[in-house]
Image (cartoon, rainbow, N blue to C red):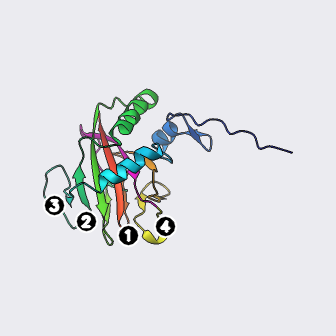
Amino acid sequence: MKHAPTPARPERSAKRRVEGVTEVEQLGERGFFVRDAFAPADLIEAALKHAHTQPLTPAGIQRGAIKSPDVRTDLTAWLDDAPLTPAFEALRQELNHTAYLGLTRFDLQLARYEPGARYVRHRDAFPGSDNRRVTAIVYLNVAWRKEHGGLLRLHVEPPVDVEPVLNRLVVFLSDRVEHEVLPAHAPRLALTAWFYA
Ligand code: OGA
Ligand code: MN
């Protein structure tokens, strides 16, 4: 009886390869990468429970800024100490080791999109400004299906749509990759970390 070769143990670092290209190479060349199974299942479960206890308010564009319902219609909460905080801290260190980004800290935000909510095309930072360098988003949508919508569209060349499935991580350069959240048709949960240099 023949056995399929044992797959190589996935590396727990951004040196991992998808189709022969490392995550860090993708970040440099296309400005983003996507990784599935970001955190252990028990932490994701804890993050979901925690998310449901957070009081949410209409999103502002910057911390404490004027609310802009023309731009984004999700509800958000800033999280100071969440079940996935250590996982994002590990990601920060990993990106510093592999991509030499010199990321010093991050803010973490929970966002909930109700049916019909969206976030129009934007960037998270502007080139040359001394603020957000890297955006990392983890999705918390159990049993997401296509009809639930809420795709993350990355306006790279050619554009890429990311399905917001449970425990999927997307990382992109905050000042480079324009992106939008297409209208959600079911509640959609995302945890976003913005890393600063
Ligand atoms: C944001 C954002 C994308 C997403 O919060 O700035 O673009 O997929 N979120 O939730
Ligand atoms: Mn954004």
Q: CA distance from mark 1 to mark 4?
A: 9 Å
Whether the residues at callouts 3 and 1 have beta carbons within 8 Å, the answer is no
Upstream in sequence: badge 1 or badge 2:
2
The three-letter code of the residue at mark 4 reads: Arg
Residue identified by numbered label 1? 186
Q: Is residue 139 highlighted in magenta?
A: yes
Whether the residues at callouts 1 and 4 have beta carbons within 8 Å, the answer is no
Upstream in sequence: badge 4 or badge 3:
3
Upstream in sequence: badge 3 or badge 2:
3
Residue identified by numbered label 2? 73
Q: CA distance from mark 4 to mark 3?
A: 30 Å
Element at badge 4?
Answer: loop
Residue identified by numbered label 4? 145
Dot label at residue 67: 3
Element at badge 1?
Answer: loop
Residue 124, horizontal then vertical, whole percent:
29, 49
Q: CA distance from mark 1 to mark 2?
A: 14 Å
